[in-house]
Image: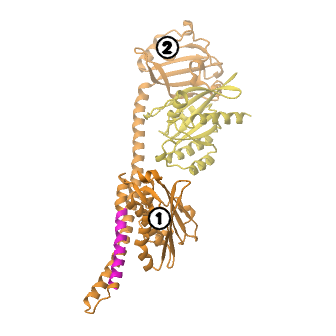
C-alpha cells in the first residue's frame, strides 16, 4: 500500500493543551502536569486511510509568544495546521485569529482544523458553541471539541485534517 | 565510513573548544545527501552512526521532512538560510541509558554563496543549557499568566456575588417591610379600639388578629427561605422522609392562605382525590414547597385573579402529581429554563417583590424528595407548576 508523508503543525496559545493532544494521539496517554514547550517537538504517527497509509509528522510548536520569523520557519512545508484553543479561556480564541492573519500574510495555505480543547472541564467552560461557530467562520476552518485528557475528538481532529488534505488534492 | 569525515584540523578543534558549545556540520550534495561531516558530527547527530556518506540527511533528521521545497530554494539561491530553533530531541543519557530531552538549533545554507547549486552546509548546535534556562523563564511566565487569569476570573465572580448579595439584602429587607407595616397598622387599629371605652366587636378584633397572623406566617416563610439557602449552599439540607398523605398538605396550605387571598380580592381553590396520596416525604417541607408556589402565584395574579391547587395520583406511573395553576400574566418561553436558578428574576417580575429564592429552594426540596418539577406557561395564558413525586406502594405504607 502506498505511504504518504505529511507535516502537520499545532498552533495555539500557551497552556491550551497542544503537547497533551499530541501525546494522547501518539502515545495514548495524558499527563496533568503543565510543562511549557520551547521551540518545537516533532512526533510521528501513521494512520490508515482508505487507499493508503498516511505518515503524519506532527510539529508541536511553543505557544504564547507573539508570532515571529522563527515560527514562520517552523511552518515551512506544513500541509495542515491544527489550531488549538482552550474552552475555559476565551482569550485563546483571539490568539487563533491572529495566527490565521499571520498565515495569510506569509501566504501559506495549509488545511486548518480547530480543536476546542478541554471539553472535559464542564464546570469551567467559558466558551459556548456560538463563539466557536463565529471563530470557525472568521478563520475559515471547521472546529471540533476535544479533550486530551479523555481522548475525545483527538483522533477525529487528525482524521479531519487528513480528509481535508485529500479533498484539497482532488 | 570514516573517510566521510573531514580531518580534524587544529583550527577547527580550537574553535570548538573556544566557543565552548557543541556544534558540528555536514556538507550535503544537491540531492541533500551527506558528502562529508565535521570530525565531531557523530557525537552530536548520530552517536551510533557509521557510514554516513551518501545517506539522505532527512533519514538522520526527520525534522527536515517537508522542508524539501525550502531546501530547493537554498540551492537555487532564492533563500539565504533556513533556521530551526530549539528542536527538541530525545537523546540517550550515556551513563544511565534513560532518554532526556536535548535542544538543537539547525541551520542550512549554501556551501558556496557564488555557486549555491553545488550543495548545502547543515549546521547543528546543541543549545540545551540556554533552552533549559529559557524553559524555566517561559514556564514561570506562563504559570504567572495563568494565575493572573484565574485571579481575574475569581475577582469577577466575587464582584458578581457581591452585587447579588447586595441586591438580595435589599429585596429581602423590602419584602420584610411589607408584612411588618401591615402588622404595625393592625396593632394601631386594635390599640385604638381598646382605648375606646365602648364595648368591642370581638369578631372585628379576631379578623384583624387573623390578618396579622397571616403576615407573621409570611415573614416566617421568608426567613425560612433565607435559612434554607444557607443550608443548601453548605450542602447541609437533608429531609426526614416519612409516609405522608399529600392531601393533608394541600388542605392545610389552602386553609392557611385563604384569608390572604380573600383580603386581596383574589381566589384560591383546590382539589384533592378521595383516595389517599401517600408519598415518602417530610410533611413540613412539602408544605413549604406549596406555600412558596402558591405565594408565588399570589404575587403575580391581578385583583380578582385565581389560583388553583390540584392533586391527583397516576397509578400506572406510580406518581403523585401536584399542580399549582394561576391565571396570571404567564412567563415567556425564553425565561422558563432559568426560573429555578438562584436569584433569577424575569424582567417582568422586577416589578413584583421577591428575593429570587423561592423557586430555587422549591427545586432543591423536590430534588431531595426524588421528584421532578417543571413549568408550563404561555404569555397571557397563565402559569402551571407541576411536581411529580414517587407514590408509596401499599406495602411501603404499612411498613
- Determine whether the residue tagged by mark 1 lies in a helix, strand or loop: loop
Reply above or below: A83 against B161. above
Q: Position of residue A99 (x, y in %)?
A: 57, 42
* Of B42 and A47, the residue lying toward us: A47
Residue A72 on image: x %, y %: 57, 35
Residue carrying label 1:
B345
Q: Which chain is orange?
A: B
Question: Horizontal placement of B167 versus B43: left or right?
Answer: left
Please give left or right for residue A134 compared with residue B362 in the image: right
Magenta-highlighted stretch: main secondary structure? Answer: helix
Q: Are marks 2 and 1 in contact (CB under 8 Å)?
A: no
Measure how far apart labels 2 and 1 are at the Cα level: 71 Å
Residue bearing mark 2: B47
Label 2 environment density (alpha carbons within 10 Å; few <14, some 14–19, many ≥20): few
Residue A127 lies in the magenta-colored region: no
Quarter of the picture holding the N terminus of chain B: top right
Viewer-nearest residue: A35 or B297? B297
- Would residue A127 be visible to someone looking at this image? yes
Whether residue B76 is visible here, answered yes or no, is no
Which picture quadrant has residue A6?
top right
Is B112 drawn above or below residue A119 in the view shown? above
The chain in yellow:
A
- Chain ID for label 2? B
* Mark identifier at residue B124: none
Of labels 2 and 1, earlier in sequence is 2
Would you identify the image quadrant in which residue A140 lies? top right
Q: Position of residue A134 (x, y in %)?
A: 60, 50
The residue depicted at 43 percent of the width and 75 percent of the height is B258
Q: Secondary structure at mark 2?
A: loop
Q: Is residue B293 above or below residue B33?
A: below
* Extent of the magenta region: B204-225
Amino acid at each position: 500500500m502506498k505511504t504518504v508523508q505529511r507535516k502537520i503543525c499545532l498552533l495555539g496559545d500557551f497552556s491550551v493543551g497542544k503537547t497533551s493532544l499530541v501525546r494522547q494521539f501518539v502515545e495514548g496517554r495524558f499527563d496533568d502536569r503543565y510543562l511549557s514547550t520551547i521551540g518545537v517537538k516533532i512526533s510521528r504517527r501513521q494512520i490508515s486511510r482508505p487507499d493508503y497509509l498516511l505518515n503524519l509528522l506532527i510539529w508541536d510548536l511553543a505557544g504564547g509568544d507573539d508570532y515571529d520569523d522563527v515560527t514562520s520557519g517552523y511552518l515551512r512545508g506544513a500541509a495542515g495546521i491544527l489550531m488549538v484553543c482552550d474552552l475555559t479561556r476565551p482569550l485563546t480564541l483571539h490568539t487563533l485569529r491572529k495566527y490565521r492573519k499571520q498565515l495569510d500574510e506569509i501566504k501559506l495555505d495549509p488545511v486548518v482544523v480547530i480543536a476546542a480543547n478541554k471539553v472535559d472541564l464542564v464546570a469551567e467552560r467559558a466558551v459556548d458553541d456560538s463563539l466557536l461557530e463565529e471563530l470557525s467562520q472568521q478563520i475559515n476552518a471547521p472546529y471540533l471539541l476535544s479533550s486530551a485528557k479523555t481522548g475525545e475528538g483527538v483522533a477525529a481532529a487528525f482524521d479531519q485534517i487528513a480528509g481535508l488534505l485529500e479533498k484539497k488534492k482532488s | 565510513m570514516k573517510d566521510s569525515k573531514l580531518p580534524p584540523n587544529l583550527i577547527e578543534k580550537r574553535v570548538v573548544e573556544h566557543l565552548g558549545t557543541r556544534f558540528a556540520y555536514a556538507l550535503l550534495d544537491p540531492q541533500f545527501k551527506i558528502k562529508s561531516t565535521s570530525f565531531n558530527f557523530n557525537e552530536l547527530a548520530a552517536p551510533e552512526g557509521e557510514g554516513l556518506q551518501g545517506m539522505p540527511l532527512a533519514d538522520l533528521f526527520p525534522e527536515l521532512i517537508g522542508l524539501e521545497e525550502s531546501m530547493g530554494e537554498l540551492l537555487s539561491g532564492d533563500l539565504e538560510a533556513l533556521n530551526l530553533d530549539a528542536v527538541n530531541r530525545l537523546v540517550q543519557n550515556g551513563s544511565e541509558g534513560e532518554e532526556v530531552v536535548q535542544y538543537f538549533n539547525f541551520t542550512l545554507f549554501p556551501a558556496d554563496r557564488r555557486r549555491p547549486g553545488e550543495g548545502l552546509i547543515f549546521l547543528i548546535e546543541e543549545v540545551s543549557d540556554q533552552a533549559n534556562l529559557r524553559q524555566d523563564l517561559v514556564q514561570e511566565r506562563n504559570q504567572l499568566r495563568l494565575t493572573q487569569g484565574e485571579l481575574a476570573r475569581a475577582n469577577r465572580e466575587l464582584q458578581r456575588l457581591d452585587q447579588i448579595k447586595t441586591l438580595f439584602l435589599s429585596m429581602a429587607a423590602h419584602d420584610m417591610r411589607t408584612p411588618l407595616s401591615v402588622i404595625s397598622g393592625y396593632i394601631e387599629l386594635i390599640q385604638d379600639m381598646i382605648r375606646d371605652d365602648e364595648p368591642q366587636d370581638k369578631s372585628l378584633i379576631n379578623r384583624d388578629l387573623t390578618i396579622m397572623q397571616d403576615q407573621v406566617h409570611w415573614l416566617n416563610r421568608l426567613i425560612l427561605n433565607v435559612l434554607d439557602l444557607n443550608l443548601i449552599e453548605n450542602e447541609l439540607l437533608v429531609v426526614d422522609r416519612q409516609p405522608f398523605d399529600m392531601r393533608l398538605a394541600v388542605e392545610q396550605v389552602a386553609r392557611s392562605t385563604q384569608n390572604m387571598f380573600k383580603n386581596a380580592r383574589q381566589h384560591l381553590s383546590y382539589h384533592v382525590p378521595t383516595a389517599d396520596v401517600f408519598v415518602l416525604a417530610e410533611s413540613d417541607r412539602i408544605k413549604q414547597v406549596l406555600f412558596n408556589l402558591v405565594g408565588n402565584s399570589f404575587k403575580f395574579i391581578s385583583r380578582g385573579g385565581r389560583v388553583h391547587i390540584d392533586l391527583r395520583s397516576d397509578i400506572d406511573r406510580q406518581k403523585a402529581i401536584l399542580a399549582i395553576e394561576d391565571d396570571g400574566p404567564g412567563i415567556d418561553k425564553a425565561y422558563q429554563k432559568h426560573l429555578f436558578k438562584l436569584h433569577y428574576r424575569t424582567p417582568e417580575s422586577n416589578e413584583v417583590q421577591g428575593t429570587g429564592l423561592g423557586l430555587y429552594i422549591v427545586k432543591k426540596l423536590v430534588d431531595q424528595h426524588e421528584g421532578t418539577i417543571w413549568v408550563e406557561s404561555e404569555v397571557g395564558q397563565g402559569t402551571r407548576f407541576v411536581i411529580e413525586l414517587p407514590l408509596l406502594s401499599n406495602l411501603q405504607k404499612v411498613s
